[in-house]
Amino acid sequence: MHQFSYAFRVDASLEIGHGHLMRCLTLADELSKYSHRCYFICNKLEKNLVKKISAMGYELFEINTDSPFNWNEDAKLTKNIIATVKADWLVVDHYSIDFEWENEVKGTKTKIMVIDDLANRTHNCDILLDGNLGKTKEHYKSLIPSQSIILAGIHHCLIREEFLVARPISLKNRLKNKGLKNILISIGASDPKNLTLDILEKLEKYGLANDCTVSTIISSVSPHLPVIQKKLLGLNFHSLLLKDVSNMAEILLKQDLVIGGVGVSAWERCVLGTPSISIVAAQNQLHGAKALHQSKASIVIDQDFSEGYDISKAIDFYMSKFNLTQASQVAANLADGKGASRAARFLM
């Protein structure tokens, strides 16, 4: 098999979150199985993320462009790097990049895959991937060249292999259903609005049973870490703090319910059949959140379509073993976790 070279243009920070980078790393891992070379092009990454990319075996090219985003400068720097690594494909996962940037880079022989969620701007790409529930080809037909390939829907969601491996174990365990004993709060690495604290306060008011344990995931570089740590010390139920986790699938295996965001993590929960309460943390999550709520795989807390649900009412719902089991089965039927392998086939 010919050895291809892939470059990923993606950014991550506390402000925009780490989801874009994580799904690109997922696709890179899949491509690397076939001995293909993968490189990352990123702007001013946090030190812990630089270490993560390096630890996973990928070479990182850091570019330092000014804020606000200067598409012309960024495109020229990226173009130089993809020429250096002789990239066959450039994978772009960045909300500030559109057809102007892509036209500049398209001057090379490198093909382009765009990963998007928003369907709100024009692209000049060869492949467009949107792995969110409810998204279809119709969302992008008018935004890309007519000959471009569209991979849309949760069938193409980029899920890390650890979840695919854990899926049969999780689905088997959930058949044993012992009720609501373990709850996980996982809003995301950034959580700029500190929704985690708000959730902890609501759970404290709810009055969970003494045999219930609440685990909270947070980044060690989060500005909210001190206040979260202080809050956990004063809670009236058993709690655990988990920082900078790298074994999310393993952690989810132990949870009866997750209170989490509506990014890629929502689809990871579906792969494992994990019942959840989902919180809309950003505007770009609204379309997927509505589809998730309507599927009944999760209760989404959002005033526009959640039918009056708040966290207390959602917890009441999941106190029923029947409801826990039903939500688990619906979630598991939505996503099989094989989206990365499907996407990779189009790039080889």
Image (spheres, helix red, strand yellow):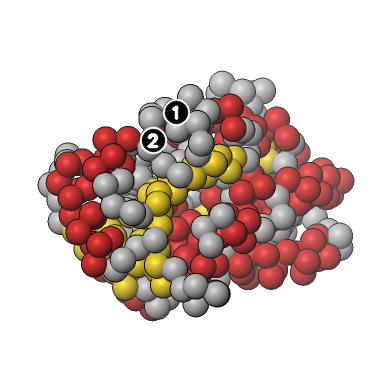
**Residue type, numbered disc 1:** Leu
Q: Where is residue 203 in the image (x, y as percent from the top left)?
A: 58, 46
Q: What element carries label 1?
A: loop
Image disc number at residue 112 = none
Front residue of this view, candidates 331 and 212: 331
User: Residue at (77%, 69%) from the top-left corner?
Assistant: 169
Type of amino acid at the residue the image marks with label 2: His
Mark 2: give few (<14), some (14-19) or many (20+) Cα within 10 Å. Answer: many
The image position of residue 28, as x and y in percent, is 47, 65
Q: Position of residue 134 (x, y in %)?
A: 63, 33
Question: Is residue 64 visible in the rendered structure shown here?
Answer: yes
284 with respect to 10 (left or right): right
Q: In this view, does 65 lie to the left or right of 325?
A: left
CB within 8 Å, label 2 to label 1: yes
**Which residue bears the numbered disc 1?**
143
**Sequence order check, earlier mark of 2 and 1:** 2
Q: Which residue is drawn at 46% across and 73% down?
A: 3
Residue 273 as seen in the image, left or right of residue 185: right
Is 241 located above or below residue 188 in the figure?
Answer: below
Q: Residue 123 carries which label?
A: 2
Q: Along the horizontal axis of the image, is 59 left or right of 176?
A: left
Which of these two is toward me, 94 or 149?
A: 149
* Tally of numbered discs: 2
Front-most of residues 131 and 18: 131
Instruction: Locate the N terminus by quadrant.
Output: bottom right
Give coordinates of residue 325: x percent, y percent: 83, 50
